[in-house]
Image: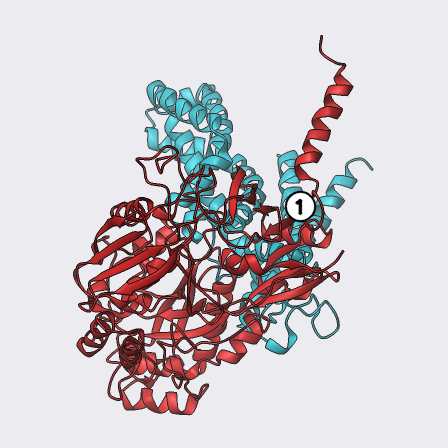
Chain colours: A cyan, B red
């Protein structure tokens, strides 16, 4: 019973996320220009049968904008997690080459971990001028050290394993050992690390966009929808913030649950 | 021995209450109108250029009809060669420390402002000289009729040579002869001012004014709880007007429009290093078509919630602007015909193309400005049916200056009580000069009209030249001529005011929501017991 409950939870979360992903991927197809289409006669309409989640100040459908925003966040999160994990994996593999390299990479990891990552994130995103590329790079650069530290420890442990010594003694090259022993061992850890990084990246994208150094204000990003909602909250237009916020929460929680399950399974 | 802790805390709390609790409804007015000046209250650095300097007096003022009225100056006269203004000062003007304001202070203010490089434009001033204690001569390099505007906006400060004179810290501790004197300024929070007992004019109705520097949400909440008597509201929150307050609107020439880069893409860059030129907006057919496609009334209704009026020029309704500048828009048919005739043909992607160039360009706006963002997004939708794609792009101001100012169409705002602004916006010598003629507009005929206006013998004559620069029957900077801008809206500034507060007859505000409403502060009255 105890073992089936987490599995059930993981299954539910996976199904939920799969559905959400399907909707998001599908959204790119059939939403078309709906997230940006203006209906001046239906400005700031509350949720109802005509407008499921209400409309914004220019009469744009909030459900369409929320879906488009989530799709955008998913894209950013995916790219940032991929890039961050790749950096972490690359440096962890590099650390196995020599003790000097290992010391250098360890120092880099410690340095980056000692800086509050939100500050660094803001600085990098601002320096790169904002936009999708800047957010992806900023999140990746600030979030690889945690995963790199785990991978490095795993690989250093592996380097001392007898079968690696035998492989060396048999005259196998560094590249061979790296490709056939280190990489297959590190990849599952890397995958879980990337999954854990994913919701972080999505939240950071939303935060950066909310603060004005993320995605362009002309894109229906979740952070932007929330920032816009702030301007109208005093006027009682609650739906502008509630639905995009809930969508973001649902997506992040689902991914986080799946990542946790995968980590336990590993 | 110190009193017990509780007693001390109560004393501190009581002290705080004494500071924040109204003396009485009639004596103290709390305003949340924003506009805290970063550089302080120093007229030499720009304070007062867009509104009432409050602490200082000006030589002249304008009434609600923008006619000149005496202030510190009782008489002002321009010499026949139009190079010297002789100013006669009133003899009862005193600074708030009781010392007399003399010609020495006026001369110092003008000479120092000319050197300070602030927002006050004194480039025409050669020298201000003291004739006697009540008379000053302002000598110009060349005739410039708009110099009189500086007599209206430049607040007079005490000469540096006198005790308590103007110095480095003046902006934080201003001393002037205006109706109020500064009591306390907590930057980012509040400004407290009290009546100047030595003010020469009629004493203001309110002993104390408290200006709160709060964000939009806090301001609205403060208005709802009755903590403020006058609050500036953005048009987006017009529907959230507290029920116990009245809506006060101030018409303005605070406009918003699209500035077009006028040159094709250039190889050389602006002095700032920013790229110059745009191949699409350099085509007059594109600019005219956009002017014809914009439904300005819908922009007012949708973006400004009805608080504004359509704009067709930089100074609509002012004497130096053509009254018949209005174009019949939207007229997509005519706009389409213009584009067809100019060789912009529709392609499969829905856009018009000419010589392989798609009719697509960025429409940049400052990212933090919700009104400009909405204007950019809605206007982009309005021109889309024409086959022109304006891509709304939010950027920070520093990024706009670094990258966009001379190569993107930019949503900008101006609006002044001085026609000198028209000169800055459209004269070729001002091309690339900061935000003004950032599109590098140049038309020799327009230049001639603008120069003639500056050198005119009278305001009336100058106005004819200003108008001719807009459209002289053959050419001009306006929509019938080069259409160098697509002006969109003039904002009406919205305030929530206590129902007991009578703000009198508000004039026409220049650019900037906030301080301009205090221009007729001396007329404000409390109508309840």
Q: Residue at x 37, y 32 (%)?
A: B163
Chain at numbered mark 1: A
- How many numbered discs, if any? 1
Q: What x and y, as percent, mark residue B462?
A: 28, 75
Q: State the SS at label 1.
A: helix
Q: Position of residue B287 (x, y in %)?
A: 33, 78
Give the residue at mark 1.
A253
Residue B395 falls in image quadrant: bottom left
Residue A191: x percent and y percent?
53, 40
Examine the rendering and report whether any part of residue B308 can be seen. Answer: yes
Quadrant where the C terminus of chain A is found in the figure: top right
**Nearer the observer, B3 or A217:** B3
Of residues A242 and A176, the one nearer the viewer is A242
Q: Residues within 10 Å of mark 1 (few under 14, many from 20)?
A: some
Frontmost residue, B380 versus A88: B380
- In the image, is residue B400 above or below residue B437? above
């Amino acid at each position: 019973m105890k073992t089936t409950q987490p599995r059930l939870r993981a299954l539910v979360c996976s199904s939920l996320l799969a559905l959400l992903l399907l909707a998001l991927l599908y959204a790119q197809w059939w939403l078309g220009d709906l997230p940006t289409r203006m209906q001046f006669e239906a400005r700031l309409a509350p949720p109802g049968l005509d407008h499921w989640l209400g409309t914004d100040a220019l009469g744009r459908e909030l459900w369409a904008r929320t879906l488009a925003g989530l799709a955008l966040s998913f894209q950013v999160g995916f790219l940032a997690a991929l890039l961050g994990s790749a950096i972490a994996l690359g440096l962890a593999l590099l650390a196995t080459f020599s003790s000097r390299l290992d010391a250098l990479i360890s120092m880099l990891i410690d340095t980056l971990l000692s800086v509050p990552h939100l500050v660094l994130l803001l600085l990098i995103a601002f320096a790169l001028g904002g936009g999708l590329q800047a957010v992806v790079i900023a999140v990746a650069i600030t979030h690889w050290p945690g995963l790199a530290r785990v991978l490095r420890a795993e690989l250093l442990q592996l380097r001392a394993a007898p079968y690696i010594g035998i492989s060396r003694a048999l005259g196998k090259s560094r590249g061979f050992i790296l490709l056939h022993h280190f990489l297959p061992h590190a990849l599952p850890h890397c995958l879980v690390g990337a999954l854990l990084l994913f919701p972080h990246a999505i939240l950071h994208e939303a935060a950066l966009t909310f603060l004005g150094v993320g995605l362009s204000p002309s894109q229906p990003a979740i952070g932007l929808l929330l920032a816009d909602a702030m301007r109208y909250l005093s006027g009682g237009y609650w739906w502008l913030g509630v639905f995009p916020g809930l969508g973001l929460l649902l997506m992040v929680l689902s991914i986080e649950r799946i990542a946790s399950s995968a980590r336990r399974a590993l | 021995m110190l009193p017990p802790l509780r007693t001390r805390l109560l004393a501190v709390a009581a002290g705080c209450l004494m500071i924040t609790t109204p003396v009485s409804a009639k004596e103290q007015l709390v305003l949340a109108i924003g506009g805290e000046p970063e550089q302080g209250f120093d007229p030499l650095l720009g304070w007062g250029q867009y509104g009432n300097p409050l602490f200082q007096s000006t030589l002249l003022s304008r009434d609600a009809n923008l006619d000149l009225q005496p202030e510190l100056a009782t008489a002002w006269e321009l010499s026949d060669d139009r190079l010297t203004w002789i100013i006669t000062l009133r003899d009862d003007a005193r600074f708030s420390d009781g010392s007399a304001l003399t010609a020495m202070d006026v001369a110092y203010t003008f000479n120092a402002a000319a050197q300070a490089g602030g927002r006050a434009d004194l480039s025409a001033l050669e020298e201000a000289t003291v004739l006697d204690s009540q008379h000053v001569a302002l000598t110009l390099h060349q005739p410039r009729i708009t110099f009189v505007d500086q007599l209206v906006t430049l607040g007079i400060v005490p000469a540096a040579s006198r005790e308590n004179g103007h110095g480095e810290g003046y902006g934080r501790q201003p001393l002037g002869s205006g109706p109020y004197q500064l009591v306390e300024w907590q930057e980012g929070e509040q400004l407290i001012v009290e009546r100047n007992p030595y003010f020469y004019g009629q004493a203001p109705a309110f002993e104390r004014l408290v200006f709160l520097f709060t964000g939009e949400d806090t301001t609205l909440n403060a208005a709802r709880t009755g903590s403020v008597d006058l609050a500036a509201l953005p048009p987006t929150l017009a529907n959230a007007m507290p029920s116990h307050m009245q809506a006060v609107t101030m018409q303005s020439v605070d406009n918003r429009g699209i500035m077009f880069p006028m040159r094709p893409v250039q190889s050389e860059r602006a002095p700032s290093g920013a790229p110059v030129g745009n191949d699409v907006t350099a085509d007059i057919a594109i600019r005219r078509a956009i002017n014809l496609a914009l439904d300005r009334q819908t922009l007012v209704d949708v973006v400004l919630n009805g608080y504004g009026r359509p704009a067709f020029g930089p100074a609509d309704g002012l004497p130096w602007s053509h009254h018949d500048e209005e174009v019949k828009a939207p007229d997509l048919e005519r706009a389409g015909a213009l584009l067809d005739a100019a060789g912009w043909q529709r392609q499969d992607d829905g856009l018009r193309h000419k010589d392989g160039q798609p009719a697509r360009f960025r429409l940049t706006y400052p990212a933090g400005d919700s009104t400009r963002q909405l204007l950019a997004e809605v206007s982009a939708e309005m021109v889309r049916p024409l086959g022109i794609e304006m891509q709304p792009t939010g950027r920070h101001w520093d990024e706009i200056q670094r990258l966009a100012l001379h190569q993107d169409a930019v949503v900008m705002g101006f609006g002044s009580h001085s026609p000198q602004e028209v000169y800055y916006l459209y004269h070729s010598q001002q091309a690339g000069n900061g935000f003004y003629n950032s599109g590098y507009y140049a038309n020799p005929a327009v230049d001639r009209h603008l120069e003639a206006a500056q050198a005119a013998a009278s305001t009336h004559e100058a106005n004819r030249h200003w108008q001719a620069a807009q459209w002289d029957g053959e050419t001009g900077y306006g929509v019938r001529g080069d259409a160098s801008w697509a002006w969109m809206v003039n904002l009406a500034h919205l305030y929530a005011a206590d129902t007991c507060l009578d703000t009198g007859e508000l004039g026409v505000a220049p650019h900037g929501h906030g301080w301009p409403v205090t221009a007729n502060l001396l007329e404000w009255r409390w109508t309840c017991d």
